Image: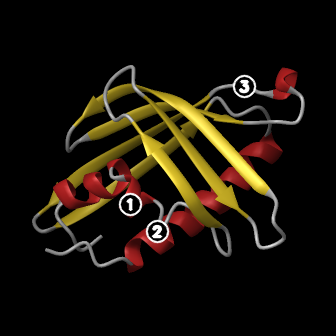
Amino acid sequence: MTAPRERVFAAWTRPEIAATFLGPEDVTVPEVQMDVRTGGSYRITMLRPDGERWLVTGVYREVVAPERLSMTWRWQEDDPADEYDSLLTLEFNAFGGETEVVLTHAQLASVESRDRHEGGWSAILDQLAKIDLGS
């Protein structure tokens, strides 16, 4: 990304910015709550065009500004027994005025879940790259 890592890190930790890119493709994000600190929690509501709501919650395991975020990732399911925590880690590597974002989503329940998340994260990172974060 053509922005300093401090600004890219801020995009992932400021709800008003995160809401502009966290919904993949035609999914909007009407609500983002974040308590960005180790042990703090977050809650993201995504809205599909058909009105279906997706809710993801988690707890920050590691917050090292502006270098790294690590958090649990849990989708709310119709049956709470189907819910599980996966682990999302974001690393922000500075290269002059640009930033490399390394996103790792581990401990997913299945290959199908991994593939769906890969597509979603690719779309989200593409949207993030289009935002003017300044230089």
Q: Is residue 35 left or right of residue 5?
A: right
**Numbered disc 1: secondary structure:** helix
> Residue, x 30% and y 59% (percent of image)?
100
Q: Is residue 75 above or below residue 101?
A: above
Mark 1 and mark 2 residues within 8 Å of each other at the beta carbon: yes
Q: Position of residue 13 (x, y in %)?
A: 34, 48
Q: Residues within 10 Å of mark 1 (few under 14, many from 20)?
A: some
Q: Amino acid at mark 2?
A: Thr
The amino acid marked with disc number 1 is: Glu
Query: Is residue 23 something one can see in this rendering?
Result: no
Q: Is residue 127 above or below residue 69?
A: below
| Residue 80 seen | yes
Residue 64, above or below 38: below
Q: Amino acid at mark 3?
A: Tyr
Q: Earlier in the sequence, mark 1 or mark 3?
A: 1
| Rendered location of residue 32, percent (x, y) | 50, 50
Report the label total: 3
Q: Is residue 54 left or right of residue 112?
A: left
**Residue located 27% across and 52% down the image:** 9
> Residue under circle 1?
16
Q: 79 or 61, which is in the foreground?
A: 79
**Residue 2 percent coordinates (x, y):** 24, 74
Label 1, label 3: how far apart the Cα atoms are = 27 Å
Tell me which numbered mark, 3 or 2, is placed earlier along the sequence. Answer: 2
Q: Are marks 1 and 3 in contact (CB under 8 Å)?
A: no
Give the residue displayed 55% in from the left and 40% down from the top: 43
The residue carrying mark 3 is: 84
Residue 20's label in the rendered image is 2
